[in-house]
Image (tube, helix red, strand yellow):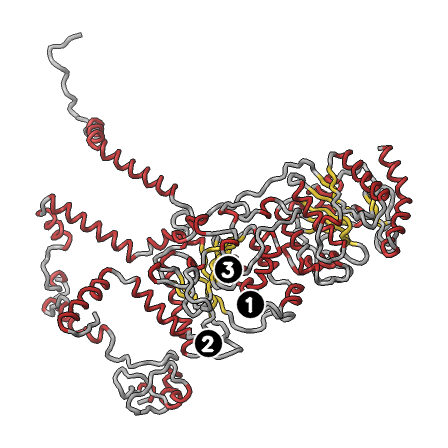
Amino acid sequence: MHYAYPPRKASHPPPYAPRSSRNIAGLRRNRTKLLAITGLFFIAVIWLLTRPSSSHAAPSPHKPSGNPPVVIVTAVDEATYDKDYLDTIKENRIKYAEKHGYKTFFPKVSDYDLKNAPKSWTKVVAMRHALTKFPDAYFFWYLDQNAFIMNPRLKIEDHITKNSRLEELMKKDHPVVPPDSIIKTFSHLKGQDVDFVLTQDSEGLSAGSFIVRNGEWARFFLETWFDPIYRSYNFQKAETHALEHIIQWHPTILARMAIIDQRLLNSYSQHNKGDEYRDGDLAVRFVDCLAAGVQACQTESQKFTQKWRTAFSSS
Amino acid sequence: MSLSRSPSPQPGGGWASPGLNIASGRSSPTTRNGTSVMWESSRLKKGAGTGYPSFSTQGSGFLSKHMRKISSSLPRFSAAGYDEKDKPISRWSTQNVPLLGRLRNIVGRMGRKLKIRLLILFTLLLSIIIFYNTPLVYHWRRTTWLGGGQKFVIILAANIGGGVMEWKGAREWAIERDSVRNKKKYVANWGYDLEIVDMKTKKRYAHEWRESWEKVDFIRTALRKYPKAEWIWWLDLNTFIMEPTYSLQDHIFNNLDKHIYRDINKYNPLNITHPLTDDYLDEVSRSPVGDGKPGSVNLILPQDCSGFNLGSFFIRRGPWTDRLLDIWWDPVAYEQKHMEWEHKEQDALEQLYTTQPWIRKHTAFLPQRMINSFPMGACSENGNDTRIHYDQKDRDFLVNMAGCEWGRDCWGEMYNFRELSYYLNRNPWERFKEDLVAVIWFKLTGQKVKL
């Protein structure tokens, strides 16, 4: 359609003039300005982010991959014990380890310079050595040479070191040195906080069978325990008393320790010093015999040799 | 009238108390002409007032001096308009145009160029005010993700030997005052935190004597008190920060790996065998430099001519530090060694460093003059040693007047270093006055002037 005249303007013009065109023009005019401002902003942000930082994040510690999951450590004294006896001991550990995919480590007492300290100190440095040799293991189980693993069906992880299992097992608010030490284990520990598991017998802490979790704490703990100043101090029961000492004086160690029931990890062959072995227990140690001499231990061990052999072959 | 307001015989001339003259000569100003005020008066004065010795304060206030001048320049109150309460406008005899309108008028008459110039001037002024008169810079420097000042806490060990062992004299007070003021200024400038701890000699522990291991407890407390702190800087009292313009970040921590050395063989006055060689240790423990990453350093300390020096050292928050602080004092070690350990906690640390691989691999050393220069009197057996002694040409950061209490003049050293520090850090205006104007004046007239 076509009209002669353009349509009339509305008598009421829109109240405000549209600003869009002006806006665009303004933007175009200000483009350089805008660019400059955003550029400055970005430079400021980049400067803020790339300033030299005064804090260097601590390098994350090596995370063990669980290969092998557990290492069984036994320090052997080849100078005093018969070779046959020690072979049986080793065979026992190796068979158990093979069954569960663990590894074994048998350092010799003569490997280490103890600076005239009693031979029993070897266990501490042997454990430290194991940490070096197996940086990817989760756990290290030290088992004394006067001991057998009796129950091949028990897996260390399920039997003891699983977090939930540990929380069940650990004795909370329990005197560290029985019966009435004023230092007691913490009552609010979580399973993942525990790096060190051991047992007590009737005389105090028992350091013949214990478990350590791999990590920086383990290195700190074992190196502290092995401090020459403790070795030269002439503790009555050598490293066991040194352990009692550091646990009671140093809360950073106490806070990482769990005491569990003796028979879970450390049954004794006789009941005079602690809980006696019963069938189904994980391990048995011959403790009384040491006073009577090495030979006595070897005879006592024979009572159990047949037992573990049958248990291992049947399972 | 009561005696309490009786003025001192000398205007502005201090209080004369016969009783105090005999014993002290320390902090009270001396009477010059021998006139004495009665003891009673000063006693009353103390009881009535704040407890501080009051010098004559009358007539010295700002208002009382200038009241007349100020009041005469104020706009006058015209009494004429006072009677007629309906005409409040004419009360003040000023022009009736409001201030804002007048300002707008002035601005309107200005040219564009002038406006821009004024704007620039105004911004400049504003930024000067922001930089120098507001706490904005302080907060910037303090914030963890900007300046990072909150990550540093300085612990200053004050009041050494105060309390039981000896009374502090005027010199000791002066040392303490100067040292504390020095650190306070430094901390206020860079946004760090300062914790002044009381090293008073007293038996804190009922069952054993572990003096000078209080360091451990104070560090622990500080870590609890300042949860954002990453590094604790321990400082003894007899230290002076000579260069307050150095920030810790710039001076040390931004380039930590360049400044520290972890292989003690670089400077080994104790002849510690390093690195460890035992087969049972892992590679990092046997390496001379630990893992070599600056992030794994948890303890940084200097060594002087006789070994570790704990007069000025850094320790970093973390589980490693908790363990060290826990193990540092051990009764079995103490029982065996306390006869040998002349420097107690310092020797204990040396012992731990020597025997404990886990400590060794997280410890680093700083060249002594980075944080702990000695004056000539300390470690002076072998004469001047450029590794040890302060050199003003190099503008060393901090001076530690270590051992000055054994036969040297602590206060004298402190005073000299303080003056030297002020001298070295004069601002341009002071330099202009003292190095140019005063010198020229001296050459012209032969007279020394103090400007």
B9 relative position to B98: left or right: right
Q: Residue at x 27, y 63 (%)?
A: B426
Which structural element holds mark 2?
loop
Chain holding disc 1:
B
Q: Residues within 10 Å of mark 1 (few under 14, many from 20)?
A: few
Q: Residue at x 39, y 48 (%)?
A: B146
Task: Name the amino acid, label 1.
Answer: His
Q: Are marks 1 and 3 in contact (CB under 8 Å)?
A: no
| Quarter of the figure with the C terminus of chain A | top right
**Would residue A175 be seen by someone viewing this image from the given angle?**
no
User: Which-is-in-front pick, marks 1 and 3?
Assistant: 1
- Do the residues marked 3 and 2 share a common chain? yes
In this rendering, the answer to whether B304 lies above or below A207 is below
Task: Name the amino acid, label 2.
Answer: Gly
Disc nearer the start of the sequence (1/3): 3
Tell me the tag on residue B407. 2
Q: Position of residue B450 (x, y in %)?
A: 21, 71
Q: Position of residue B316 (x, y in %)?
A: 51, 53
Chain holding disc 3:
B
Tell me the tag on residue A83. none
Residue denoted by label 3: B222
Q: Position of residue B431 (x, y in %)?
A: 23, 63
Q: Residue furthest front?
A: B382
Q: Residues within 10 Å of mark 2 (few under 14, many from 20)?
A: few
Which structural element holds mark 3?
helix
Q: Quadrant of residue A95?
A: top right
Front residue of this view, candidates A53 and A255:
A53
Q: Position of residue B337 (x, y in %)?
A: 63, 66
Q: CA distance from mark 1 to mark 3?
A: 23 Å
Residue denoted by label 1: B343
